[in-house]
Amino acid sequence: MANSDQIKALIKSHFDKDGNRFKTIALQLAASEARNGHGNLANDIKKLIESGSKTLIRKIPNKKNLSDLMQWVEPETRLSQLVASDELKNRIERILKEYKQKSKLSKYGMTNRRKVLLAGPPGTGKTFTASIIANELDLPIYVILIDKIVTKYMGETAAKLRMVFDFIESNKGVYLFDEFDAIGTERARDNEVGEMRRVLNAFLQFLEQDQSNSFILAATNNIGLLDTALFRRFDDTLFYNLPSKEEAFELIKNKLINFKYGFKIENISLDSFVGLSHAEISLACEDAVKDMILSGKKQVQKKAFISMLQNRQEIYKRK
Ligand SMILES: Nc1ncnc2c1ncn2[C@@H]1O[C@H](COP(=O)(O)OP(=O)(O)OP(=O)(O)O)[C@@H](O)[C@H]1O
Ligand SMILES: [Mg+2]
């Protein structure tokens, strides 16, 4: 039987519109049912979760070929789940606040921040932030597939960009140009320099002309590569970093909140997670939980967790 805390947490996560947490608790329910010998019920719960959580690709209406260029994804996370510096959180809060009160701003001829560059190393929360903005503001989120937009032929690329920006204009939402470096790079390979510059100029023109109510977010791992002309076209730039010690502890606590663990998180040595991103620490937490489930233990084991973190660090040493 599900315990009362699990039921309460499940209901709370539904009303918080926190899809990730809902899924984690539901999976935990399935695991405890399986442990209690209710294998069929556990499987049924797992099947429901799987069928419900498939990333949906919503048909993008009325526009031929547009659905090849962008994907609709379901936003499923809240700002409270983001582990980041206060400064970064405040900046995201300001984006949300300006949107919610944009009519106030417009009375004074001002517009809300909505063209935002997200810069930082892989796995530190850039895509996560796009999802948070969409979920907090109840907007759909679309990811633009840049590799499908940029083709050998400039005319074709510009036509595709126009199609996307037309859609942005007529469908309010959050639009994420992920791996934006593909367009925004200053130093493309020699023979491509002229071509990429023209693509970039076309993008900048569309970005500048855009008067929509949508959010246009561009994410990059490599801000050093981006053309400086880009920065002033965005209303704001958010910088992401690898987690500090405190942030790593907070993240681990969040990830293990629904599980028992017989150790103090603050006692984990810094060496075990130095250099790891939020995404990698999250995955190591999940690995340690899986290890607990599969080895039939009741608590997440410190030794197993440390070794999962070290496995992730090893990947860097091999690079
Ligand atoms: N700051 C964070 N706080 C909490 N969880 C995070 C954070 N950053 C990443 N995660 C976890 O890692 C996953 C992957 O992160 P995300 O996709 O946002 O990384 P990214 O910065 O977009 O990386 P990339 O540059 O590779 O696209 C998230 O879905 C989330 O579970
Ligand atoms: Mg990303």
Image (spheres, rainbow, N blue to C red):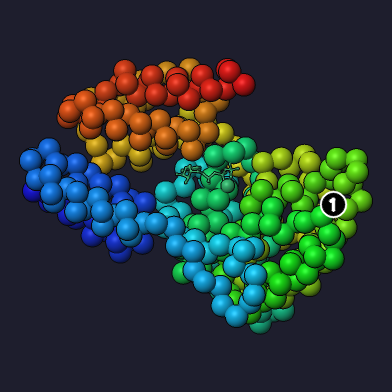
Which element is circle 1 on? helix
Please state if 41 lies on the left or on the right of 209 as rendered.
Answer: left
Q: Which residue is mark 1?
A: 196
Q: Residue at x 83, y 59 (%)?
A: 153
Q: Position of residue 125 (x, y in %)?
A: 54, 45
Residue at 36% across, 41% down: 254
Q: Position of residue 43 (x, y in %)?
A: 19, 49
Instruction: Please tell me which residue is depicted at 78% across the width and 50% down the height of the picture.
Output: 184
| Count of marks overlaid on the render | 1
**Where, by quadrant of the figure, is residue 208 drawn?**
bottom right
Quarter of the image with the C terminus is top right
Mark 1 Cα shell of 10 Å, populated few (<14), some (14-19), many (≥20): many
Between 297 and 112, the one lying in front of the other is 297
In the image, is residue 286 above or below residue 12? above
The answer to whether residue 170 is left or right of residue 82 is: right
Q: Is residue 132 above or below residue 277?
A: below
Residue at the spot x=56%, y=77% of the render? 61
- Residue 17 screen position, x and y as percent: 36, 61
